[in-house]
Amino acid sequence: MTSKPALYLKSARTKSLERRHPWIFSGAVARIDGNPMSGETVEILSEKGKFLGRGAYSPTSQILVRVWTFDEGEDIDAAFFRNRLQEAFQLRRDLLRDKDGTTALRLVNAESDGLPGVVIDRYGEIPVCQFTSAGAEKWRGEIVRQLRDLTGAATIFERSDLEVRSKEGLPPRSGLLYGADPPELVEIGEHGCRYLVDIRRGHKTGFYLDQRENRRAAGEFSSGAEVLNCFSYSGGFAVHALQGGAEKVVNIDASADALELARANILLNGLDAGRVTNLCGDVFALLRRFRDEGRRFNLIILDPPKFADSRHQLPGACRGYKDINLLAFKLLKPGGTLFTFSCSGMMEPDLFQKIVADAALDAGRRAAVIKRLFQGEDHPVALNFPEGAYLKGLICRVL
Ligand code: SAH
């Protein structure tokens, strides 16, 4: 008999856990012994009492438990978090070596690094943490202690101000976790480009680190190009495009703050701001306006926010992707290139490609995929957690 709270799974519902998928849905649970608190560690057992794992209990979430370990010999304590962090750093050893001036990366990618609900991004010397599950919240103090010890960081910041926290019964939270206040803007390097990141108020933890390799790829398609950078945020793609020799760049974003930062980032790199037009507005509307005005571009980037949070939002998301891709195909010059992305985890890569194919068809353009794109290697996808693969993209060439 164990004194820890124990959760027994229905016999027919143990398969996914045996394949080491880290989520347990409430419908899979036969019964719970003890009275676990939110975030508390529970033993996960088969109905006959065989050990299956150990995880964090989250009574308000549909995902009732997120598994910390499948190893009976591994306790959930300070040493556990230290080991998991070290493993995550080890996986990223090449990126951490800071080749070609890349100083920002994701250090911990939640489930895929064996730490459900824990995201840690590093901007220069400053780690920024996101705790999105009850278990991560319970252990935040220990995680920050181990992170501080392993990295020697003088400042650790928190950006747990996400909507998903409410599903775990947690309030949004952000601010200093350790050390001195961070600067208003933190400078980072990415493949030879420099950016200012607003870790206090920016999106996510401040920057879309998952697009690092794809921004570099876009730079390689930019020589002499007129570029339309849709959903530009702080100019991530724009800076790479200008470094890559773009003639002109039009950035579109709904956020005036993001565009202001995009301008600062272009100047920071010593690039010619005269080649850049920033338009604050709705991409859907502005693409239509450009179509009506007969505007044409050599390179178009479509990097929209997540259109679908749940399965029932998928049809609407499909229409949204179809719409912007169709308009983009119409705006491309012959021989032009489209970089098109979806960061909706619900959107399967094959369905996304089909939508893009329909968009080209309806736009009356012949196009071919010349490359499939994915999230960067610091956003790994554990093989037991395919849900971790959310970002997908296509580079399409039109005739
Ligand atoms: N490409 C960026 C990240 C884009 S994130 C990079 O590499 O950093 C998505 C952006 O789309 C956000 O900045 C958000 O403000 C903007 N956005 C969301 N909906 C929009 C809309 N309908 N029209 C214009 N911008 C929008």
Image (tube, helix red, strand yellow):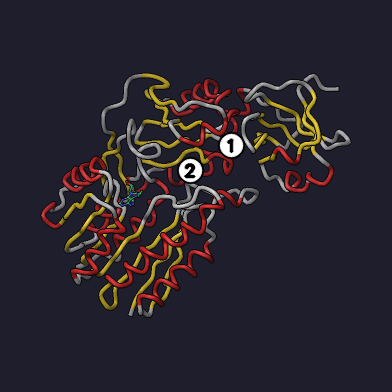
Q: Quadrant of residue 113?
A: top right
Q: Which residue in the protein does label 2 denote?
A: 93
- Left or right of 201? Residue 16 is right
Question: Which of 34 and 225 lies nearest the eye of the viewer?
Answer: 34
- Who's the residue at 14% across and 57% down the image? 275
| Residue drawn at point x = 27 percent, y = 70 percent | 331
Q: Give the amino acid type for the residue marked by disc 1 in the picture.
A: Pro
Give the x, y percent position of residue 322: 41, 65
What residue does disc 1 label?
Answer: 116
Q: How many marks?
A: 2
| Callout 2: SS | helix
Residue 38 rendering spot, x and y as whole percentages: 63, 24
Q: Is residue 111 left or right of residue 354?
A: right
Residue density around tag 2, few if under 14, some if 14–19, many if 20 or more, within 10 Å: few
Rendered image: mark on residue 390: none
Quarter containing the N terminus: top right
Which element carries disc 1, helix, strand or loop?
Answer: loop
**Residue 119, percent from left and from top:** 49, 36
**Percent from the top left, x then y, of residue 153?**
40, 26
Task: Estimate how packed mark 1 is, as few (under 14), some (14 to 19) or many (20 or more) residues with alpha carbons within 10 Å.
Answer: many
